[in-house]
Amino acid sequence: MKKILTLILLMSSIFSFGQRGKIDSLKNDLKKIEAMSPSYARDTFSSNKIKKLMYYYTFFNTDSSLFYTNKLLEISQKRNIETNIIHCYNYFGYLYGLDGNYFMAAQNYYKALGMAEKSKNEKRILDSKLYLTEAYIGLEDFDKALKYGKEALVLAKKMKNSNEIMSGLNDLGTVYLNQKKYKEAKAIFEELQVIALKKKMRIIRQSVIIHWGKRN
């Protein structure tokens, strides 16, 4: 057991070291870009570097990831790049969710959803509704989670996006389990299993299988 723990810690340290090397390089590149004369090109180059910093920081320093997400939001608002603005609000929500602040996560998802609906951007509407489903699962407001989960699934099926369909089904299965609606949860699992088999994937939530196993 000690050997396994040591190996895990070693791999974690190697991963962290590798990420920090990439981060330092990106920060140096960003500093050089920001020293350039103001222009659309400078903002574009900055945005690309900032996005990578947002992602690299996500899993070990959410405060830094929030900082860079806010920088991207400022540039995107200045240039009125709507897709980036929506993405920033959704990413704010994601980061707050990682920290367990599901209320703030939902508030940011609502901002993204409002903009996406105004511009009729179906992909971003779908993303925001899926994220809201997960935020309300975290808040244990399963009625609202069910509402957004169903809406997201309808849209995912309309768009024929199999990955998002699977994500929506998985969320709905989680909601039904928490509501102790095992018959509905089982139906969701079976639908999800069919898609997974077509994609040659092995699934799914172990907790789902355990719950259904007790009733079959």
Image: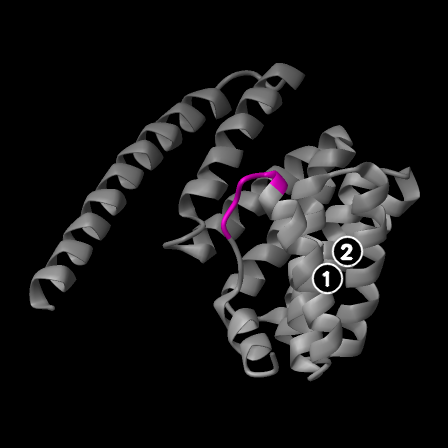
Disc number placed over residue 182 in the picture, else none: none
Q: Are marks 2 and 1 in contact (CB under 8 Å)?
A: yes
Q: CA distance from mark 2 to mark 1?
A: 5 Å
Residue 180 is drawn in which quadrant? bottom right
Residues drawn in magenta: 198-202
The mark total stands at 2
Residue that appears at 80% across and 77% down: 143
* Residue 156 occupies quadrant: top right
Image location (x, y in percent) of residue 114: 85, 52
Name the disc covering residue 129, or none: 2
Q: Residues within 10 Å of mark 2 (few under 14, many from 20)?
A: many
* Horizontal and vertical percent position of residue 6: 11, 59
Q: Write down the residue under mark 1.
A: 132
Give the SS element for disc 1: helix
As shown in the figure, which amino acid type bears the numbered disc 2?
A: Lys
Q: Is residue 103 magenta?
A: no
Quarter of the image for the C terminus: give it.
bottom right
Q: Is residue 51 something one can see in this rendering?
A: yes
Instruction: Please name the residue shown 73% across and 37% down the image.
Output: 77
Instruction: Name the foreground residue: 88 vs 30.
Output: 88
Residue 103 appears in the picture as rendered: no
Q: Amino acid at mark 1?
A: Leu
